[in-house]
Image (spheres, rainbow, N blue to C red):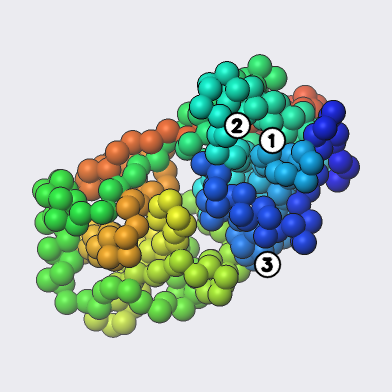
């Protein structure tokens, strides 16, 4: 990847020696999350054939902003995309150093514009989900980027008693049903192969396909670098795993990263019970909220609504820099029925 330079500014990829500097930047950034860190980059690259790229805008050896993306080759062209089980990538900016909105907007807009110009030169397609705190996307809109709102649900877990009182009646009933069912449940050391098998059942139950590689599930469930992780599971009388949640967290919030349920046990109350137990566990750790990661599929969104979360918007950014590439890809997706 070539460097991209403007007067006093340069965009280039973070080197191995600079990862600690990047991670410190992400720690302070309003858009910083576990998924933008070098730790997550290493996990993704070990588990998949994808390349995770971290580009930064530099000025006098200081990071002014950056972009995190997954690089893939499609139809002979490079594309910058989202990654499976990486809900938020995209752009990150530093905390504002000025109380004046004019100065703040000027600095942020210049950084976003510089990053956009760089990415447009590198990739035929850009398609990334940004962290919810990135809301001023005018520099990208002006450059012809498509900006689409997406939605997630946030669950305030800081006060379990208040949380319980806010649950819909059917959720409370499901939790009580799960507690009375007699199966094992709670924090659990589940073998990744079992988690993957259950995920396979979940995603293919209606004839769908599972796009998630077993190696990715294994890394996310066991990678020693991911220190802030917990797995909750439920097992039936025959010791069969019937429900599982993998949750990770950073300084800001926890993420409901992976959930899978045995289709034959959907009415057992296990999934609702595990969410309730996870919420209590997070509260005990002082973690204020759980990101349900998505409220865009109606059926799944309705289930999550029963826990009385609040709706939050994040933005999906898309830019095609090669119209022939776009036409070929769209035609292929139409043939495949995607």
Q: Which mark is residue 46?
A: 3
Residue count near mark 3 (Cα–Cα under 10 Å), binned few <14, some 14–19, many ≥20: some
Mark count: 3
Circles 1 and 2 in contact, beta carbons < 8 Å? yes
The CA span between labels 1 and 2 is 7 Å
Q: Which residue is mark 2?
A: 317
Query: What's the residue at 79%, 56% (across, down)?
Result: 15
Check the image and report above or below for 57 versus 35: above
Circles 2 and 3 in contact, beta carbons < 8 Å? no
Q: Position of residue 268 (x, y in %)?
A: 21, 64
Query: What's the residue at 30%, 47% (across, down)?
Result: 155
The CA span between labels 2 and 3 is 26 Å
Q: Left or right of 324: which side holds 295?
A: left
Q: Which mark is residue 201?
A: none
Front residue (pair 332, 315): 315
Give the quarter of the image for residue 23: bottom right
Q: Which residue is mark 1?
A: 126
Residue count near mark 2 (Cα–Cα under 10 Å), binned few <14, some 14–19, many ≥20: many
- Label 3 element class: helix
- Please tell me which of labels 2 and 3 falls first in the chain: 3
Q: Left or right of 290: which side holds 137?
A: right
- Label 2 element class: strand
Residue count near mark 1 (Cα–Cα under 10 Å), binned few <14, some 14–19, many ≥20: many
- Please tell me which of labels 1 and 2 falls first in the chain: 1
- Label 1 element class: strand
Q: Position of residue 202 (x, y in %)?
A: 41, 59
* Quarter of the image with the N terminus in it: top right
Query: What's the residue at 38%, 49% (across, down)?
Result: 291
Outermost residue on the right side: it is: 2
Check the image and report above or below for 195 versus 276: below
Query: What's the residue at 18%, 66% (across, down)?
Result: 178
Check the image and report above or below for 117 versus 198: above
């Amino acid at each position: 990847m070539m460097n991209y330079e403007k007067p006093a500014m340069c965009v280039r990829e973070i080197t191995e020696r600079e990862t600690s500097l990047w991670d410190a930047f992400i720690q302070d950034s309003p858009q910083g999350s576990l998924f933008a860190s070098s730790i997550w980059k290493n996990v993704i690259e070990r588990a998949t054939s994808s390349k995770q790229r971290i580009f930064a805008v530099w000025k006098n050896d200081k990071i002014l902003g950056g972009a995190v993306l997954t690089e893939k080759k499609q139809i002979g062209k490079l594309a910058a995309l989202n990654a499976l089980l990486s809900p938020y990538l995209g752009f990150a900016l530093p905390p504002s150093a000025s109380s004046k909105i004019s100065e703040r907007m000027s600095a942020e807009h210049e950084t976003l514009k510089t990053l956009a110009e760089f990415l447009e030169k590198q990739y035929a397609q850009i398609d990334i989900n940004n962290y919810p705190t990135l809301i001023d996307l005018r520099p990208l809109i002006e450059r012809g980027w498509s900006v689409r709102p997406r939605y997630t649900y946030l669950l305030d877990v800081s006060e379990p008693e208040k949380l319980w009182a806010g649950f819909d009646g059917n959720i409370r009933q499901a939790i009580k049903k799960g507690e009375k069912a007699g199966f094992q449940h709670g924090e659990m050391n589940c073998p990744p192969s079992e988690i993957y098998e259950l995920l396979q059942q979940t995603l293919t139950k209606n004839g769908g396909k599972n796009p998630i590689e077993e190696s990715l599930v294994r890394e996310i469930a066991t990678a020693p670098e991911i220190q802030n992780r917990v797995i909750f599971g439920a097992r039936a009388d025959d010791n069969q795993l019937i429900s599982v949640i993998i949750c990770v967290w950073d300084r800001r919030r926890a993420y409901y990263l992976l959930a899978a349920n045995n289709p034959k046990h959907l009415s057992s109350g296990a999934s609702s019970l595990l969410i309730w137990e996870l919420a209590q566990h997070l509260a005990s750790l002082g973690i204020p909220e759980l990101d349900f990661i998505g409220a865009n599929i109606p059926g799944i969104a309705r289930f999550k609504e029963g826990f009385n979360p609040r709706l939050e918007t994040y933005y999906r950014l898309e830019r095609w820099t090669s119209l022939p590439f776009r036409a070929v890809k769209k035609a292929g997706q139409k043939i495949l029925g995607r």
